[in-house]
């Protein structure tokens, strides 16, 4: 058995693992990045990037349909070409994948293909696809194995029953699509497919979409999805999914006990994520696991001081850019890097949520209902995009900005946006909440005109 030695072994090459590898290698450490699939992980190949390729094309298509020749733009014979979109996804993901691999190579990161398993605090076993097993000895370990689509009991993925992975392998546009789950993936895919002409039905066992977002934002999304004839069944469970070869037979059960059967071209299961925990024997190694996630401190260390867990595996906030920051924090701690004499720690108070539906949704901080449930006295202000100059110019008048501030101090506690450029506008609010700024302090910075972010300024005022 071949034995290799590294300063740091990283299992998983998603945003968190690759960011940690870049930082550590740039500082001269010998780094092994172990990946059993494709470098870049779920985000690059099956999540963030391909979904935004699809959503951007759908938004362009809808923009052309909506504006017609009223903007001085005439497009005869406008149609949506699903096959061309699939080609573009492959091209964009491929370019980013090659760039990522080249960047890691340039920095001197050793990428090892295979399934990595932590067998002791300083040894990682790697099984290649051909069955060959090798071991590497390391001083530090970063576990960054991410998560996979959660599949409910009794559901068999395959054929016409798909997850967020298989949806990007479709060669044909579904005429009728069932989406089970009203979270981020479900809402983004409902927005995409309905925009290009697919008949979409969403099934959500809860009472609303996007449980992690402000209720008013979620309600607005329901209204806007309705414009594209998206049917949403709340309080409904999927009792059965059967792939018939030509379609999917669906059995639904509502909270009132009523049953309904239907048939769709495909069923997209968007029921959340399951953490990829099979990277070691947690109990044998003595690594603490609580609530089915790996316990870490603010430096992303596990109960074994030389073993770190980041990203979805740490279970704090299951977002690619959270994993990236956690990877940075773990790398800085291994290096002993400090800022102003203080060791950098992970802070979750100002992590934005960005959802690329049409229109976009973004938020940071607490929701109105959370603030009131905590007994806080708050001031809530809203501003509509329908009164914003740039939004009117763009023909994007839907949505609003909602600001929650402490009524006594004026400190901004939360910002929630649904509308054009929401995922960009939220950056300023994220910085403000991170620094504990008041609405008055935020307004002290001059913004351009005409820009969509003026809607945030109006809500702050």
Image (tube, helix red, strand yellow):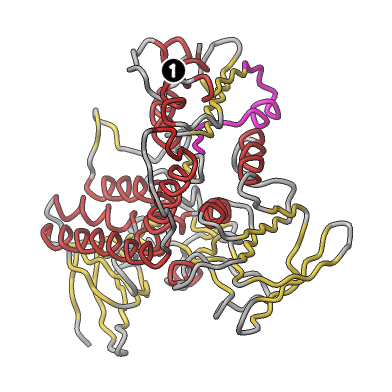
Q: Residues within 10 Å of mark 1 (few under 14, many from 20)?
A: some
* Quarter of the view holding residue 408: top right
Residue drawn 57% across and 66% down? 150
Is 193 above or below relative to 74? below
Magenta segment boundaries in residue numbering: 360-379
**Quarter in which the N terminus is drawn:** bottom left
The stretch drawn in magenta includes residue 137: no
Residue drawn 58% across and 16% down? 406
**Residue closest to the eye, 363 or 408:** 363
Q: Position of residue 12 (x, y in %)?
A: 34, 65
Is 374 above or below relative to 101? above
Query: 29 left or right of 242?
Result: left
**Residue closest to the eye, 127 or 113:** 113
Q: Position of residue 273 (x, y in %)?
A: 54, 61
Q: Secondary structure at mark 1?
A: loop
* Quarter of the view holding residue 77: bottom left
**What residue sits right under mark 1 in the picture?**
437
Residue drawn 29% across and 89% down? 130
């Amino acid at each position: 058995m071949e034995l290799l030695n590294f300063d740091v072994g990283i299992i998983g090459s998603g945003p968190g693992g690759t960011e940690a590898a870049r930082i550590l290698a740039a500082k001269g450490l010998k780094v092994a990045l172990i990946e059993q699939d494709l470098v870049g992980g779920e985000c690059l190949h099956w999540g963030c990037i391909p979904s935004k390729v699809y959503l951007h094309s759908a938004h362009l298509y809808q923009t052309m349909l909506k504006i017609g020749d009223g903007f001085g733009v005439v497009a005869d014979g406008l149609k949506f070409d699903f096959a061309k979109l699939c080609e573009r996804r492959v091209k964009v993901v491929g370019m980013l994948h090659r760039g990522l691999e080249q960047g890691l190579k340039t920095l001197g990161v050793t990428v090892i293909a295979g399934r990595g398993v932590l067998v002791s605090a300083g040894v990682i076993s790697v099984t290649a696809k051909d069955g060959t097993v090798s071991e590497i000895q390391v001083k530090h370990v970063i576990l960054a194995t991410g998560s996979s689509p959660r599949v409910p009991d009794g559901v068999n993925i395959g054929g016409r029953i798909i997850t967020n992975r298989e949806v990007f392998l479709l060669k044909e546009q579904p005429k009728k699509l069932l989406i089970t789950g009203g979270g981020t993936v479900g809402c983004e895919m409902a927005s995409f497919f309905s925009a290009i002409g697919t008949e979409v039905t969403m099934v959500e066992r809860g009472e609303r979409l996007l449980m992690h977002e402000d209720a008013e934002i979620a309600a607005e999304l329901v209204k806007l999805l309705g414009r594209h004839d998206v049917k949403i069944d709340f309080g409904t469970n999927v009792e059965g999914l059967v792939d018939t070869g030509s379609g999917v037979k669906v059995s639904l059960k509502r909270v009132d006990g009523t049953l309904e059967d239907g048939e769709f071209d495909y069923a997209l299961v968007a029921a959340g994520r399951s953490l990829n925990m099979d990277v070691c024997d947690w109990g044998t190694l003595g690594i603490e696991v609580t609530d089915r996630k790996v316990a870490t401190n603010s430096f992303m260390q596990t109960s074994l001081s030389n073993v770190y867990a980041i990203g979805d595996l740490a279970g704090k906030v299951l977002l690619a850019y959270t994993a990236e920051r956690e990877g940075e924090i773990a790398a800085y701690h291994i290096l002993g890097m400090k800022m102003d004499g203080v060791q950098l720690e992970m802070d979750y108070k100002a992590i934005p949520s960005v959802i690329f539906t049409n229109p976009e949704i973004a938020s940071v901080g607490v929701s109105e209902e959370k603030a009131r449930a905590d007994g806080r006295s708050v001031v809530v202000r809203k501003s509509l995009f329908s009164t914003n100059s740039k939004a009117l110019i763009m023909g994007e008048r839907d949505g609003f900005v909602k600001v929650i501030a402490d009524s006594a101090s004026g400190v901004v506690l939360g910002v929630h946006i649904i509308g054009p450029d929401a995922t960009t506008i939220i950056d300023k609010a994220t910085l403000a909440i991170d620094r504990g700024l008041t609405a008055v302090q935020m307004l002290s910075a001059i913004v351009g005109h005409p820009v969509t972010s003026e809607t945030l300024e109006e809500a702050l005022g």
